[in-house]
Amino acid sequence: MSSKAVFLDRDGTVIRDPGYLADPAGVELMPGAADALRALAEGGYRLVVVTNQSGVARGLLTEETLQAVHDELRRRLAAAGVRLDGVYYCPYHPEAPIERYAVDSDLRKPRPGMLLQAARELDLDLPVSWMIGDSGRDVEAGQRAGCRTVRLPAGGPDSPGGDVQADYTAPDLPAAARLILDAPPRRDTPPTTGD
């Protein structure tokens, strides 16, 4: 049986966003993030980070460095009793200076590729899952994957996709977690019948 999940943007949602983080020592959890994620996991949600990382395509860090950053993120969360079920990233950007990363990839949010890949690999039920992020790109990716969405304010209206409307908004990750845990089950849309 498929599981429900909460997909999480990384920068500005789970950790502070210093811009193109290339040093594992710079991983800093957002206030209340570990408690919020633990509550979601205890509520039966699998936790999956989905993050655009064009800094790789721009030559600002390597995939190995990015892996070290994600290892540190996992370590810090594990120390607080939280286990991530998956970390998915898109290293591509269509205008990248590094040729092998200059790809218009379906993995790059606002496209839903990372969420769809995680759903296949982790057996996740997208219609009962959620996407939390601080930009319109995050919200749109979640919507295109068929998830309900929560937008945090960090991205602001001038961030890419600033006019995309989420199902809900929350001031921070702890509030988003409470909202998800208190939300009524999603009602399926009845099938349409043709005459």
Image (tube, helix red, strand yellow):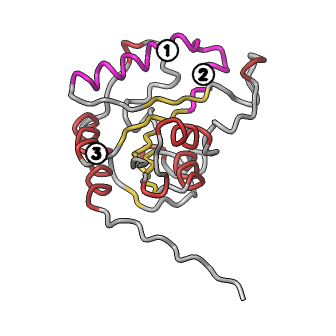
In the depicted structure, whether residue 20 falls above or below residue 35: above
Magenta region includes residue 78: yes
Q: For mark 1, does the 10 Å Cα neighbourhood hold few (<14), some (14 to 19), or many (20 or more) residues? A: many
Q: Which mark is residue 55?
A: 2
Q: Is residue 57 left or right of residue 49?
A: right
Q: The residue under label 2 is which amino acid type? A: Gly
How crowded pointer 3 is (Cα within 10 Å; few <14, some 14-19, many 20+) is rated as many
Res. 111 image quadrant: top right
In the image, the segment drawn in magenta is 52-79
Which of the 4 quarters of the picture holds residue 52?
A: top right
Residue 107: percent from left, percent from top: 64, 36
Residue 66 in the figure: left or right of residue 184: right
What is the crowding at mark 2: few (fewer than 14 residues within 10 Å), some, or many (at least 20)?
Answer: many
Q: Nearer the viewer, residue 188 or 153?
A: 188
Is tag 3's residue or tag 1's residue first in the polypeptide sequence? 1
Residue at image mark 1: 22
| Label placed on residue 40 | 3
Farthest-out residue, bottom: 195
| In front of the other: 4 or 184 | 4
- Picture coordinates of residue 85, whole percent (x, y): 39, 32
Asked if the residues shown at circle 2 and circle 1 are in contact, with their CB atoms under 8 angstroms apart, the answer is yes
| Disc on the earlier residue, 2 or 1 | 1
Kind of residue at badge 1:
Ala
Horizontal relation, residue 81 to residue 147: left or right: left
Q: Position of residue 42 (x, y in %)?
A: 23, 43
Say which residue appears at 60% left-offset and 50% top-offset: 161
Foreground mark, 3 or 1? Answer: 3
First-in-chain label (3 vs 2): 3
Q: Are marks 3 and 1 in contact (CB under 8 Å)?
A: no
